[in-house]
Amino acid sequence: MRYFTGIDIGSTASKVVVLDGEGLVERFVLPTGWSSKDTSREIRRRLAELGTPVNDEMKVIATGYGRISVDYADKVVTEITCHGRGGYSLLGRDCSIIDIGGQDTKVITVEKGATVSFLMNDKCAAGTGKFLEIMANRLGVELGEMFAMAARGKPLAISSMCTVFAESEVISQLSKGTDKRDIINGIHQSVAGRVAGLAHRIGIQDQVVMTGGVAQNKGVVKALEEELGCQIHTSPLTQYNGALGAALFAFQKYQKEQKA
Ligand code: ADP
């Protein structure tokens, strides 16, 4: 059996997708930790454990900020290109992809199936997963419970754009006795406002897909839908989008080699 594996070593989480010629075989996510070299070794070990070992029967494409650490990859491809490919496969048509990861946010434009432009915020934590993690930590809630809590809250304006100042604002709201659910609602809106600003700068297509770990937070997706005034598509593979794109490139590479 031939396998096509995409490995996305992100700044926060590393994602792995294994395809065979017909579809998805395995997927898993693990924290990147401080050493992407160790993470890539751990991924190789897990692949073997799952019965899909790295060998001549497997093509591997690595992407993400730690992609060069994957010394067993057949090729490395930039994350923007992989995210474009993955997002296109999720929707099957041209779209804008809004990817909110741990430490950066990207808006990618896909036309005729290919990435044609992108804009990235990687200079500031506001509007990224890190912002949400810091706020969740401050509020003593899990990332996974934020949506349900926000859904029962009223919108509260968080005016500071900077993460450090926004955190002080949250502390001050907590000390005033403001309901955590309202604060979380405001946090989601703050992220959505920041990301919508980036999206408006590049312009968005009729179809919008949201990917990255933060797309699992339905509160952010909903707030962003309201900011952009359009429906946003997500999928269960949202956090795996870059790895999925890389695995699809691995399959394409194999097909090209077979034809040559
Ligand atoms: P990167 O590729 O930059 O490492 P990811 O796209 O993997 O980032 O996303 C990581 C981020 O996803 C984390 O910072 C975290 O905020 C967010 N995240 C992970 N799981 C969840 C969840 N269940 N609900 C909401 N956010 C989540």
Image (spheres, rainbow, N blue to C red):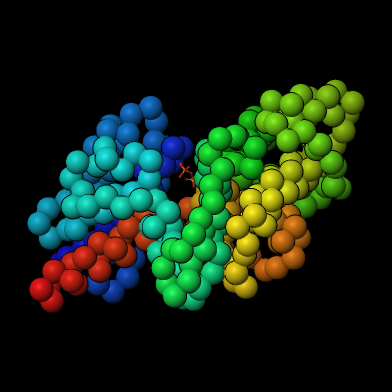
Instruction: Answer above or below: position of 156 versus 200.
Output: above
Q: Quadrant of the N terminus?
A: bottom left
Residue 61: x %, y % from top left: 26, 54
Instruction: Answer above or below: position of 255 versus 211.
Output: below
**Relative horizontal placement of residue 246, taking residue 201 as reference (left or right):** left
**Relative horizontal placement of residue 76, taking residue 55 as reference (left or right):** right
**Relative horizontal placement of residue 218, taking residue 170 as reference (left or right):** left
Residue found farthest to the right: 176
**Relative horizontal placement of residue 130, taking residue 150 as reference (left or right):** left
- The reply to whether residue 250 is in sight is yes
Residue 7: x %, y % from top left: 32, 50
Where residue 180 sits, quadrant-wise, is top right
**Residue situated in front as seen by the camera: 219 or 117:** 117
The residue at 74%/43% (across/down) is 190
Number of disc labels: 0
Q: Quadrant of the C terminus?
A: bottom left
**Residue situated in front as seen by the camera: 189 or 203:** 203
- The reply to whether residue 219 is in sight is no
Where residue 252 sits, quadrant-wise, is bottom left
The residue at 46%/64% (across/down) is 116
The residue at 62%/64% (across/down) is 204
Residue 12: x %, y % from top left: 46, 37
The residue at 80%/28% (across/down) is 169
Residue 230: x %, y % from top left: 70, 68
